[in-house]
Image: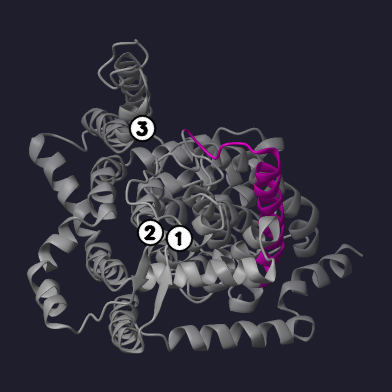
Amino acid sequence: MAEEKNEPANEAPKDEGKSSLFDKFLNLIEIAGNKLPDPVTVFVIIIGLVMLASLVSALAGVSVTHPGTGDDIEAVNLFSGENIQRIFTDMAQTFAEFPPLGLVLVVMLGIGVADKTGLIHTSLKRFVEGAPDSLITATIVFAGIMSSLAVDAGYVVVIPLGAVIFYGVGRHPLAGLAAAFAGVSAGFSSNLVLTSLDPLLVGFTEPAAHIIDPEYFVNVAANWWLMIVLVPVFVIAGWFVTEKIIEPRLGTYEGTPEEDENDTNDKITPLVKKGHRWAGVSLLVSIIAVAFLVIPEDAPLRGAEGELTPFYQSLVAIIFFLFLIPGIVYGVVTKQVKNDKDVAKMTSDSMASMGAYIVLAFVAAHLIAFFNWSNLGLIIAVSGAELLQMIGFGGVPLIVSFIFVSAFINLFIGSASAKWAIMAPIFVPMLMLMGYSPELTQAAYRIGDSITNILTPLLPYFPLVIIFAQKYEKDIGLGTLISLMVPYSIAFGLLSTIVLVAWILFGIPLGPDSPLYYAP
């Protein structure tokens, strides 16, 4: 009797008849996405199109009236002698002054040391393994969300760990894997603390806002309060979907996982526990030190009149130290760090892993610069805003629509920075002209960008997740894995959109000094 009950449950995800139409759609996405060039090439192509558009627009005499100043804004030909000269002479400066470049690299220096010493890995593992059985699902989802502190750690640590823990307590390992994958990837944009994603996105948002308002400042913590609230929302949603939808569908696991020779080499030893404890102490001391720099009225990180603007502008440096110091302490105690050369090597190794980002930043910097020099970004924004106002499309429906647009584009372009580099110069100014702040546009983008990560085969880590899953189900494929993740995507997308809509309706700031609306 039990055998008859469990067999259909185990086969349900592999039922080609029920999901054949959906699988065909996903296969089309995969084929189309795989035919796209490398993101760097895509940027180069767009740069060429921008230059060509500037020539055509300038020859056609395209212009708009700036809604703030009343000045006529005309399209500028980037093929003119003056601008060709500018492209060549300003190339190094354009790259060096690209805001996300310094912000992200500084943060990653600190995070890189904490990652290379094993501190982040150990923290995630101990947190999940220390949870009571009744909270295992919620703990795995939460650990996945928090793992965005170090992007790779979540995929290579939390996802396989979720499967191992579920299997160890007699539950279906694929349910644990799915819960972890949902937290790591669909919940990527939310966190209780600021991550490298925050300065990365702000670095694109602020230059885009300057198209309308050259003095506009976007705080690194622009979406912090909203992202904090989304954490428990995603944890509850992940718990519900896992235990009420995914596990009943999978049934009882009766297979035998393949042995992994690395499983026995990942133990929490007394020395690791000692290192983790002292890292925690150093983190607490660091936080107290930061508090002394901020809380007193005449503290160094307060302005002349006691305002907290210097503190907000120092968040990147603070994040750097809050990862670097505990990372070094952990490394010293666990003997991963024996001298200063080890720390230097870890920082250089973390920078080596940023090579692809630096190349992408080079072309993205010039794309944004060309948008600004040609005035096309402003012209598109003004024209788009006028069109939306003419048809009466605005308010909550406009923001919700933007979330869905971001989620759809995410199916084809996996990189959050690559998408935002393209979208920010268009949508941030456009929505500013509609009265919405750059911070709100960025928040809507973050929601849309993360909720479909778990559905697209173009996510760089998707093949790795399939490999983890095949340890428990040898014949699991793309369609099966995606069919497991669809309920999470729907739940996370629906709830996060509702939260943002409520945020707008109640007029709650998105973060410190981060308004919902823009008024010139």
Q: Which residue matches tag 1?
A: 429
Q: Which residue is mark 3?
A: 312
Question: Where 211 falls versus 476 (above or below)?
Answer: above
Toward the viewer: 173 or 113?
113
**Who's the residue at 61% across and 38% down the image?**
229
Q: Do tag 3 and tag 1 residues touch (Cβ < 8 Å)?
A: no
Could you say whether the residue bearing mark 3 is in a helix, strand or loop? helix
The three-letter amino acid code for the residue at tag 3 is Tyr
Check disc 1 and give the amino acid type.
Answer: Pro
Say whether residue 19 is left or right of residue 408: right
> Tag 1's secondary structure?
helix
- Give me the disc on residue 208: 2
Mark 1 touches mark 2? (CB < 8 Å): yes
Mark 1 or 2, nearer chain start: 2
Q: Nearer the viewer, residue 18 or 46?
A: 46
Q: Is residue 118 left or right of residue 255?
A: left
